[in-house]
Image: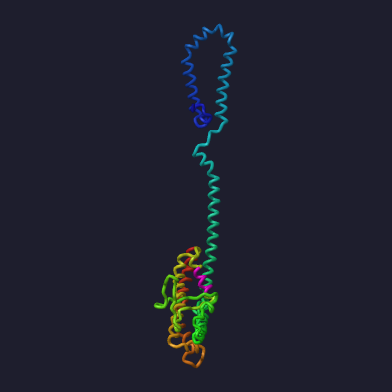
């Protein structure tokens, strides 16, 4: 049956002709004796039945012509390989379109990453030690807490210590608690802070400090900031977090020594003038070295991305 398939001649034209010639020869050879005898017998009838024989010959010729027509004009069905070949231009266009989309997406991610890391670089860069402390509002927080303790001293002297609430003197009510050993415990009702009149276990903060800390946390949590930058940034954040605890340590120590360090902290000519501020300035860890490491990591990330 394969010989009659319309697409056979296109790929095996010569072989197919030879096969047809061979089949015709075998047919003639096989039917020749019987055909001769039939002709002799039917010679007399031939004159009467020639229309029927003509119809048979015409049918055979029509059938052969139909087969030849189909073999010449009908295209073969697409094979698996040819289908892939035919579909390769659309696939190529699709791959090119997909590649273009990936490049465009990568470009958008790079732009967003550049913007985020540039924001971090702008926040830490171009500042000396004092500028970094100003960015976190450290000097103002110190003075704000000295003033808060002065108010607290007034409440204590008036016998109204329990009426004093730290959050009333902090921007947005934000307060940092110092978990000083021996002064806090955890029970069924939560954390209990045991603070006496001389204990300074709370630190009020400012909006600027809160915003600066929120920025650092956002940079650390951002997927756009490379890990190579996040590591030194986390170390910088650790340095920043040490400052409030150090501040409470100094305030607590000076309060236990003498409350006059707070009362007369701005009185020139007294032994208490500027003591707390000077001690804090000398003991505070420097922010600049840690910030420079972050900026170096950012510069290295620019070179890698290029």
- Please tell me whether residue 9 belongs to the stretch shown in magenta: no
Q: Nearer the viewer, residue 198 or 125?
A: 198
| Residue 92 x %, y % | 53, 47
- Please tell me whether residue 216 belongs to the stretch shown in magenta: yes
Figure colour scheme: rainbow
Give me the residue at 53% from left, 49% from top: 95
| Residue 12 x %, y % | 49, 30
Q: Could you tell me how many numbered marks the image carries? A: 0
| Residue 126 x %, y % | 52, 75
Q: Is residue 202 something that shows in the picture? A: yes
The vertical placement of 6 against 89, above or below, is: above
The vertical placement of 34 against 219, above or below, is: above
Which residue is the extreme one toward the right?
Answer: 51
| Image quadrant where residue 190 sits | bottom left
Task: Specify the segment rendered in magenta.
Answer: 210-217
The vertical placement of 263 against 245, above or below, is: below
Asked if residue 282 lies left or right of residue 6, the reply is left
Asked if residue 123 lies left or right of residue 235, the reply is right
| Residue 255 x %, y % | 45, 85
Which residue is the extreme one toward the bottom?
Answer: 269
| Image quadrant where residue 51 sits | top right
Q: Is residue 126 something that shows in the picture? A: no
Give me the residue at 58% from left, 21% from top: 62
């Amino acid at each position: 049956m394969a010989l009659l398939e319309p697409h056979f001649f296109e790929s095996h034209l010569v072989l197919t002709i030879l096969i047809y010639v061979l089949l015709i020869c075998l047919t003639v050879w096989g039917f020749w004796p019987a055909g001769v005898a039939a002709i002799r017998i039917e010679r007399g009838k031939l004159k009467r039945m020639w229309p029927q024989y003509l119809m048979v010959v015409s049918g055979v010729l029509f059938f052969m012509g139909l087969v030849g027509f189909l073999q010449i004009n009908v295209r073969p069905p697409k094979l698996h390989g040819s289908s892939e070949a035919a579909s390769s231009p659309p696939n190529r266009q699709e791959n090119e379109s997909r590649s273009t989309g990936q490049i465009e997406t990568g470009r958008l991610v790079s732009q967003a990453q550049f913007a985020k890391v540039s924001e971090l670089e702008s926040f830490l860069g171009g500042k000396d030690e004092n500028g970094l402390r100003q960015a976190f509002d450290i000097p103002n927080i110190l003075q704000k807490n000295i003033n808060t303790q002065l108010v607290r001293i007034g409440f204590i002297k008036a016998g109204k210590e329990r009426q004093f609430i730290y959050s009333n003197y902090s921007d947005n009510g934000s307060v940092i608690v110092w978990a000083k050993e021996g002064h806090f415990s955890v029970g069924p009702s939560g954390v209990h802070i045991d603070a006496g009149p001389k204990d300074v276990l709370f630190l009020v903060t400012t909006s600027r400090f809160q915003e600066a800390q929120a920025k650092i946390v956002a940079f650390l949590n951002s997927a756009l900031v490379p890990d190579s930058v996040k590591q030194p940034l986390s170390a910088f954040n650790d340095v920043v977090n040490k400052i409030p605890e150090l501040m409470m340590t100094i305030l607590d120590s000076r309060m236990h020594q003498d409350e006059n360090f707070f009362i007369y902290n701005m009185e020139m000519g007294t032994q208490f003038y500027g003591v707390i501020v000077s001690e804090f300035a000398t003991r505070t860890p420097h922010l600049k070295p840690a910030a420079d490491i972050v900026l170096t990591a950012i510069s290295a990330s620019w070179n890698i991305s290029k």
